[in-house]
Image (tube, rainbow, N blue to C red):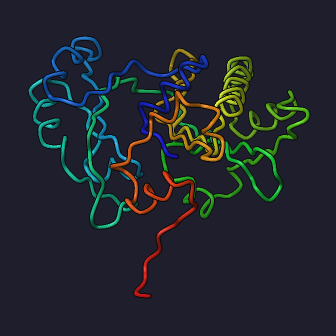
């Protein structure tokens, strides 16, 4: 089960991971009050259309705006629309909420930080790269040496040697090791306690203050473990799912719709 960005970051923040100040709005009437709490007079705020797909920025679904009237026009245009990205197909996905987010830029560096269940090794694998802010598939194709994958034995959990290996690939200053180590352990706790199947923080930014921040986050929950988390089941957004797959899920069936004419 995929989550929206604002839902994912709320879970991460609940585990102590650093996230920007933000408010999700579902109606334009909520914008003015949210703007007062989030926007900076000199830098404005970031507005992000919430859909279960990547490529939102290139599709016009992410804007940095400095004035409330500009933000109102964006929200008016985006709420209730179908956002088409390279991941959605030509029909697009329905936008029912906009995330109003603190503008944390400029930053010192953008990193990639991810975790996934590797079914072949039956372990959770960390994936990190100093090349954040772009599709990790592009980095893997063009500069694979800039990606590190570290598999974790579930019996031992994350060890200092694992963190040092990831830290070396990111080529960060030694003084940042303690903060990075804390972030890795918080992510490990969130992934296991909340039964994530995927966690992707892209970018994980390093601010000028030396603070790490989850500028964007993608989380997919393990459907087979949802019975343990009734509080997470309510986060499902059926407008983002194939209606046939959604109906199958209600019947406890595994169903994946495919293209074709059979």
The percent coordinates of residue 35 (x first, y second) are 22, 18
Q: Position of residue 127 (x, y in %)?
A: 69, 45
148 vs 20: above or below: below
Residue drawn at x 49%, y 45% as measured from the top left: 2
Q: Closest to the observer: 214 or 106? A: 214
Q: Quadrant of the C terminus?
A: bottom left
In this rendering, the count of numbered labels is: 0
Q: Work out whether residue 70 or residue 158 is closer to the camera in this orientation and state it.
A: 158
**Residue 182's image quarter?**
top right
Decide if residue 210 is on the left or right side of residue 38.
Answer: right
Residue drawn at point x = 81 percent, y = 45 percent: 151
Image quadrant in which you'd find residue 23: top left
Placement of 173 over or under 151, stated as above or below = above
Residue at 50% over, 19% down: 208
Task: Decide: is 249 above or below 80.
Answer: below
> Which residue of the protein is positioned furthest toward the right in this rendering?
155
Residue 10 x, y percent position in the rendering = 48, 24
Which residue extends farthest front?
A: 251
Q: Tell whether 178 sits left or right of 226.
A: right
Residue closest to the far top? 37
Q: Residue at x 72, y 42 (%)?
A: 126
| 238 relative to 17, above or below | below
């Amino acid at each position: 089960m995929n989550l929206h960005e604002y839902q994912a970051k709320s879970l991460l923040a609940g585990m102590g991971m650093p996230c920007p100040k933000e408010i999700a709005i579902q109606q334009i009437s909520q914008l003015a009050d949210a703007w007062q709490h989030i926007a900076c007079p000199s830098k404005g705020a970031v507005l992000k259309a919430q859909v279960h797909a990547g490529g939102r920025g290139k599709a016009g679904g992410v804007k940095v705006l400095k004035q409330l009237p500009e933000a109102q026009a964006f929200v008016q245009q985006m709420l209730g629309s179908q956002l088409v990205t390279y991941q959605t197909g030509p029909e697009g996905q329905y936008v029912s909420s906009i995330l109003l987010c603190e503008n944390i830029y400029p930053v010192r560096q953008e990193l990639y930080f991810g975790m996934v269940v590797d079914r072949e090794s039956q372990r959770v694998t960390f994936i990190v790269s100093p090349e954040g802010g772009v599709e990790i598939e592009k980095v893997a194709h063009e500069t694979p040496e800039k990606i590190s994958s570290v598999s974790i034995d579930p019996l031992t959990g994350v060890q200092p040697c694992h963190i040092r290996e990831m830290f070396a690939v990111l080529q960060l200053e030694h003084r940042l090791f303690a903060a990075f180590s804390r972030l890795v352990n918080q992510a490990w706790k969130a992934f296991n306690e909340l039964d994530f199947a995927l966690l992707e923080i892209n970018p994980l930014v390093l601010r000028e203050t030396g603070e790490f921040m989850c500028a964007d986050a993608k989380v997919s929950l393990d459907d087979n473990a949802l019975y343990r988390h009734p509080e997470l089941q309510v986060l499902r957004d059926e407008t983002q799912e194939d209606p046939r797959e959604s109906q199958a899920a209600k019947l406890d069936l595994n169903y994946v719709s495919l293209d074709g004419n059979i």
